[in-house]
Image (cartoon, rainbow, N blue to C red):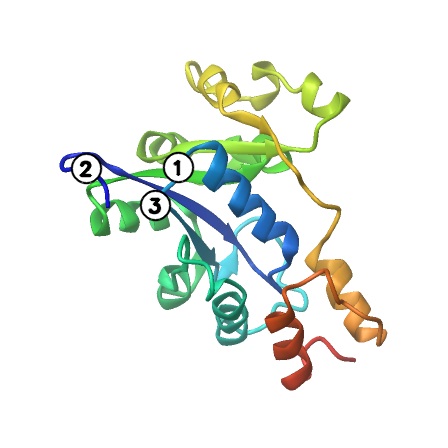
Amino acid sequence: MNPAGKKSRIGILGGTFNPIHVGHMILAQSALEAYELSSVIFMPCATPAHKGRQALLSGKHRLAMVERAIGWNPFFEVSDVELQRTGVSYAVDTVSVLTRQRPQAQLFFIIGTDTLLELHKWRSVYDLLALCRFITFGRPGPALDALGAKSLNLDPPWPERLMKDVTAGRLLDVSSTDIRYRVAEGLSIRYLVPPEVEMYIAEHRLFRR
């Protein structure tokens, strides 16, 4: 329970989750710990604004896999806000909805360094930046060290503010694309996805040729 008057700190982790994998789980847990979040909301999108729709499963399946992956964790939850809205999923619309739904919460949008460099292309990005705090996780190394405010292509004071919330994280080299390929080729995805997700994919014969 939060002390009276204290805002809860809620993380938002958006994506296609096609399928959700252990990299998503570790990213959410890292954000939870590093920024002392109350919870992390996994937000499956309807139609991604910045990715192609190739091999995108229905929202029903992607939502079900997230529910199974996080069901045991009291600090993780899932929202179908973007799936219910349908159409192209824009973060500014989603965060606006969450702001109305949870007026006592401080929202933290969780991204990776690759997304941070593309943030200037997002719809109504300055409205979005005013609504929530972006926290960025990157793989430790030269690329993260070289990341700077000038590379973000945003007006002041946002580059400096965003750079203050860049954190070295334990990111794994796991991708949904590779998992789909392995399933199609009949290869194991054990340890790449939670066991509950592996079972769901097998039961529903997803991603097969």
Which of the two residues, 149 or 192, is positioned nearer the viewer here?
192
Q: Earlier in the sequence, mark 2 or mark 1?
A: 2
Q: Nearer the viewer, residue 175 or 129?
A: 175
Res 198 quadrant in image:
bottom right
**For residue 191, what is the image quadrant?**
bottom right
The amino acid beneath tag 2 is Pro
Q: Nearer the viewer, mark 2 or mark 3?
A: 2
Amino acid on which disc 3 is placed: Val
Residue denoted by label 2: 3
Kindly identify the residue that appears in the image at 52 percent across and 20 percent down: 163
Q: Nearer the viewer, residue 70 or 102?
A: 70
Read off the residue under disc 3.
95
Q: Position of residue 192 (x, y in %)?
A: 72, 60
Left or right relative to 121: residue 198: right
Q: Which residue is mark 1?
A: 124
Foreground tag (1 vs 3): 3
Q: Are there few (<14), some (14-19), or many (20+) residues within 10 Å of tag 1?
A: few
Against 112, residue 194 (above or below) is below
Q: Secondary structure at mark 2?
A: loop
Q: Tell whether label 1 touches label 2 (CB within 8 Å).
A: no
Q: Secondary structure at mark 3?
A: helix
Question: Taking 17 as reference, is 143 left or right?
Answer: right
Image x and y of residue 158, in percent: 44, 20
What is the distance, in whole Å, between disc 1 and disc 3 at their CAs? 12 Å
Amino acid type, callout 1: Ser
Q: Where is residue 157? Give x, y as percent.
A: 41, 14
